[in-house]
Image (cartoon, rainbow, N blue to C red):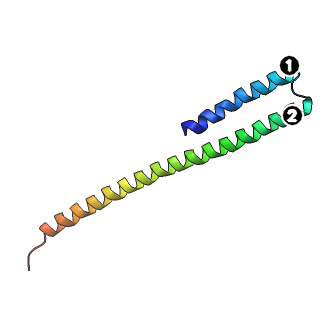
Amino acid sequence: MAHLEGLHKQKAADRTRVVGLFRRGRLTDAGLDAQMEEIRKEETALEAQLAQLRNMIAGAGSIGTAISSAQTLLEMLGNRNTTSRSHMPTP
């Protein structure tokens, strides 16, 4: 995740470099537009990947919580079953 976040931050630096090239006359208007569009597409793709990864991490956390809750419930039921059997008369 840190790698993707680093790549996302790098896009701002890329944008700055491209504008610098334009200001120095090394890029035309069309070249600037094309480069900025490419950076925007890359940035959008990285944002989608980051969102997907965050959702996966959140989902893993909620699965862990559900498993823990189920385990606690099973332990409670097991204890309750053991307790109720100890109070039953033997035949």
In the image, 85 versus 52, the foreground residue is 52
Q: Give the amino acid at mark 1.
A: Arg
Number of residues whose C-alpha sits closer than 10 Å to that of mark 1, classed few (under 14), some (14–19) or many (20 or more): few
Residue drawn where x is 36% and y is 58% of the image: 70
Q: Nearer the viewer, mark 2 or mark 1?
A: 1
Q: Residue at x 66, y 30 (%)?
A: 10
Q: Amino acid at mark 2?
A: Asp
The C terminus, quarter of image: bottom left
Query: To which residue does mark 2 refer?
Result: 33
Quarter of the picture holding the N terminus: top right
Secondary structure under tag 1 reads loop
In which quarter of the view is residue 16 placed?
top right
Q: Do callouts 2 and 1 mark residues in contact (Cβ within 8 Å)?
A: no
- The mark tally for this picture is 2
Task: Tell me, for residue 86, which label it has, or none.
Answer: none
Outermost residue toward the top? 24
- Measured from the top left, where is residue 14 in percent x and y? 73, 29
Image location (x, y in percent) of residue 29: 91, 30
- Frontmost residue, 76 versus 2: 2
In this rendering, position of residue 21 left or right of residue 13: right
User: In screen coordinates, is 81 left or right of 87?
Assistant: right
Q: Earlier in the sequence, mark 2 or mark 1?
A: 1
Q: Find residue 43 and report its image quarter.
A: top right
Q: Is residue 16 above or below residue 6?
A: above
Residue in the image at 80% along x and 21% along y:
20
> Around disc 2, counting alpha carbons within 10 Å, would you say few (fewer than 14), some (14 to 19), or many (20 or more)?
some
Q: Which residue is the extreme one toward the right?
A: 29
Which residue in the protein does label 1 denote? 24
- Which residue does the image show at 12% across and 67% down from the upper left? 86
Q: Quadrant of residue 2?
A: top right
Q: Residue furthest left?
A: 90
